[in-house]
Amino acid sequence: MPAAVTSRKLMEMKKSGEKIVALTAYDYPFAKMADEAGIHLLLVGDSLAMVVQGEATTLGVTMDQMIYHTAITAKAAKTAMVVGDMPFLSYQVSTQEALKNAGRFLKESGATAVKLEGGAAVSDTIRAMTEVGIPVLAHIGLTPQSVHQMGGFRVQRDRDRLMEDARQVENAGAFAVVLEGIPTDISKEITDNINIPTIGIGAGAACDGQILVLHDMLGISSGHVPKFVKKYAELRQHAMEGIRTYIEEVQNSTFPDENHSY
C-alpha cells in the first residue's frame, strides 16, 4: 500500500512537477472508491450543503454536520489526505473560537488538516492554527462563503489582490492554497511565485493540482454545472435507468424471480 499523503508529500510533488489530484467527498462509499483509485487529497467540503443537503449556498451547514461527514469520510481514507472544510462563522468570529473548531476536526473526525476561505483577512487565524500544530489548506479567489458580498459566483480578476492573498496565506503557514474562479494567467503567476502548492478549481491548468466536486464530475448532480467541470461519468443517468427498471419489474411481478427468492 502506498504511504499516506501528507503536507510534506504535497510540497515534494510541487517541487518535482507531479500534479496533485483532489476531490470532494462526503461519505464512506465514495471516499473509499476515490482513495482506492489513488486520489491524493479528499476535501470534505462545506459544499455538502448544496450537493448533499440541497441548499442554494454553502452558508447553512453546521460544525456538527461537517464533523459527522468528515468522520465517515476519514474512515475510508487509507492513503489520501483528508481535509475538513471549516463552515461559515466557525472561524471568523474570534481566533479562540477558530482554534477550538479547527481542533474539533482533528480530534473528533480524523481529518489531518482544515481548510478555510480568505486571504490576507484570515492570515492571522491561519498563523494561530499552524502555530499550535493544525495544518491549514487556504482558499482564495472565488470564496463561496462570501457569495452575497461578491454578488454571486463570479470569476475573480483582481491580480494584485489575489497575489497578495496568496503571499499572505503562505507566510502565515498554510501548506497549500486552493485557487477558485481565477483566470489562467493569474493562477500561473501565483503558482510560479509562491513556494506552496496551488490546487485549482476553475483556475486553469497551470496550478500544481486540481480539485472538483465529486458529484459534478461523476454526473450525479442535476441542474447547472459550472463551465470548469468535466463530466467523467454519467452516474445519474445510469441510476435513473436502474430505478425505473426496478419499478417496472416490481409492478409487472417479474421481480423477485426464482433466482432472487428463497
Image (cartoon, rainbow, N blue to C red):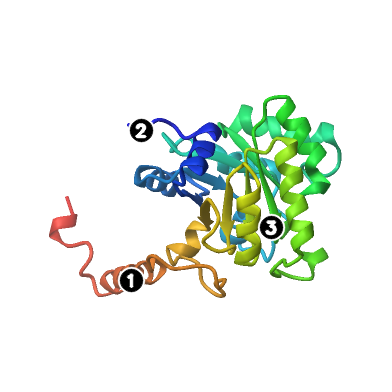
Disc nearest the viewer among 3 and 2: 2
Where residue 13 sits in the image (x, y, percent)?
Answer: 48, 41
Q: Residue 58, labelled with which disc?
A: 3
195 in relation to 163, above or below: above
Task: Tell me if residue 118 can be seen.
Answer: no
> Distance from label 2 to label 1 (Cα)?
43 Å
Where residue 93 sits in the image (x, y, percent)?
Answer: 86, 42
Give the mark count. 3
231 in relation to 69, above or below: below
Disc nearest the viewer among 2 and 1: 2
Disc nearest the viewer among 3 and 1: 3
Judge from the rendering whether residue 71 lies leftward or rightward of residue 150; answer left or right: left
Q: Amino acid at mark 2?
A: Pro
Residue at point 51%, 55% (across, down): 210
Q: Are marks 2 and 1 in contact (CB under 8 Å)?
A: no
Residue denoted by label 2:
2
Q: Quadrant of residue 133?
A: top right
N-terminal of the two: label 3 or label 2? 2
Q: Amino acid at mark 3?
A: Thr
Judge from the rendering whether residue 4 lies leftward or rightward of residue 242; answer left or right: right
N-terminal of the two: label 3 or label 1? 3
Q: Secondary structure at mark 1?
A: helix
Q: Residue furthest top?
A: 132
Where residue 200 sits in the image (x, y, percent)?
Answer: 57, 56
Q: Amino acid at mark 1?
A: Ile
Q: Residue 247, labelled with which disc?
A: 1
